[in-house]
Image (spheres, rainbow, N blue to C red):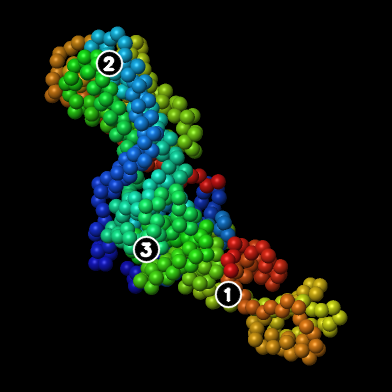
Amino acid sequence: MTDDVIDSVIDIEGLRCSYGTFEAVRGISLRVRRGELFALLGTNGAGKTTTIEVLEGLRRASAGRVRVLGLDPVRDRRALRPRTGVMLQKGGFSDSLTVRETVDLWRSFTARPRPVDEALDLVGLSDKLDTGVAQLSGGEGRRLELALAVLGRPELLFLDEPTTGMDPASRRRTWEVVRRLQEDGTSVLLTTHYLEEAELLADRVAIMRAGELVTVGTPDTVVRTLPARITFRLPAGSPPVPRLGGASVEVDGDRVTYETRELQSDLSDLLAWANGNAIALGDLAARPASLEDVFMGIATGDEDTGDNNDNDDERLEVTR
Amino acid sequence: MTAAVQERTTGVPSAARQLGALVRMELLLLRRNMTATVLSVVTPMVIGVVLVSGDYDTEGAVARTSGVIGMMAIFSVHHHLVTAYASRRQEMVLKRLRVGLPADSTILVGAASATVLVFVVQAVALVGYGMVVSDLPMPVNPLTMLVAMLLGAAVLGAFAAALSAVTRSSEAAMLTTLPTVAIFLMAPGVLVPLGTMPPAVEDAAMFLPMGPFTEVLRTSWLGHELGGGAELGFLGTTVAALPWLAVLVAWLALAGWITKRYFRWEPRHS
């Protein structure tokens, strides 16, 4: 075993996974380092859940090599289980049990589990101890899932869309818990629909489309592949807009969009031009590219996002 | 394996402890849904008592009661568990457990435990009813009877797990269990009294799972084979039961293999 292998908690090479004739995952390779929080992004059907299920040992790969903590997730399931924690997308609780009974049951399946109080305190459910699972709100149910996933202080935690269905307070609480776990050295593989979540929590992100990995890197480097954007409305009767440094410009009626890699200098040139000509730019906005822009570009199957100026209204479940 | 890893794998609860926790949960669920539980225990009992009532001699009554216990097993264990496995798969309970420590077999046995317990209670109660109300003799070998009940229930439960793979929902179980219930009922001594089929057919049909099940119940209860024969005593009935129990073990192995190969742990992807 080389140091390289020990250092990575997840090691995938050429993973393929098919359901019948449909190939859900088409040859992906990636490596998650120990202590890292890695976010796997993609639209529904991109292959995220299939990938995570292969890593959890629930599904066999059709081809490729998969190692989790250096072990084969299907063959070495017994050795692996005590070291991993899994938060599934939904359900799986018996509705007629209380929160306490559910945690107690799971403690019987966990090596050196956290005490019930500690586990529930961690996710802020201490006051729900004797509540029936069926009576929990959607967000509380998700937090109970999280409590069970971390009951055994896992080395590696799988979070499959952990904050889907949570209210903003639950979501922030969950982020805090995940951060704290990461500080304690837990490695995390996260899938999410919320790009803000990935941007905030992840050390590295990967974006999947149609079973393939399109981009892998830190949120910063992924975002830096796209230019920043300046938009405004040009009042009628104004002179034509100027050329700015290396920025590209697109005019659609009175709407003007610049894409630039030199946001500060191009913006000040633009403002100097507008002030000099006494033009009031309407709805002026300048912002760097976000993970969302990258994601939208990829999700819509168009890697050159220059054409997608009007997708602001149809963003995918983005929270602000 | 590094020391750290070794340390992580100690303190893992034993399979027995995991199974114990699942059984306790199943029993808790039974208590929570008391109305449903009482109905599921009492209804087959009432039907069972009606079916064993009639003008029988001792041998006839024991044979009839053994057959009725077989029928109860088919419906209370086999049919019920097909429904239970399918609904738990739909509710994602099985998948939830499977991402935890318990082995596949522990999850499946745990899910069946309360059902099998209810069946054994019903069967013992029916035997008790026969002794108290119909003056039937005390069973000569209660041990082999109990082993046959448990092994028979295990076979029926394992086929239920296998069958649940093609049962999309608990509602669909009505349809998918038709052929298996028919085959289980066809064994001589269950629905059809012994000696009414052509001998060659009966000899072959005795090897269907419920054939050995009822055979062991009859002989171990009476202490001799149906239609007279030497008194075998406890030891004799034990020896006589062994080949039949072996047939049940073979069925269990087959059903277990099918389950291992085809069981579905989560709803189909739509």
Residue depicted at x 25% and y 22%:
B127
In the image, what residue type sits under mark 1?
A: Val
Quarter residue B239 falls in = top left
Residue depicted at x 56% and y 55%:
A45
Asked if badge 2 and badge 3 are on a common chain, one would say no
In the image, what residue type sits under mark 3?
A: Asp
Using the image as rendered, state which of residue B15 and residue A211 is in the foreground: B15
Dot 2 lies on which element? helix
Q: Chain of mark 1?
A: A
Residue depicted at x 78% and y 91%:
A276
Image coords of residue A286 (percent x, y): 67, 79
Using the image as rendered, state which of residue A277 and residue B141 is in the foreground: A277
Q: For this view, does A161 lie left or right of residue A121?
A: right
Q: Which residue is mark 1?
A: A223
Quarter residue B106 falls in = top left
In the image, what residue type sits under mark 2?
A: Ala
Q: Nearer the viewer, mark 2 or mark 3?
A: 3
Q: Nearer the viewer, mark 1 or mark 2?
A: 2
Image coords of residue A256 (percent x, y): 76, 76
Dot 1 lies on which element? helix
* Disc on the earlier residue, 1 or 3: 3
Q: Nearer the viewer, mark 1 or mark 3?
A: 3
Q: Which residue is mark 3?
A: A121
Asked if badge 1 and badge 3 are on a common chain, one would say yes
Q: Residues within 10 Å of mark 2 (few under 14, many from 20)?
A: many
Q: For this view, does B40 lie left or right of residue B4?
A: right
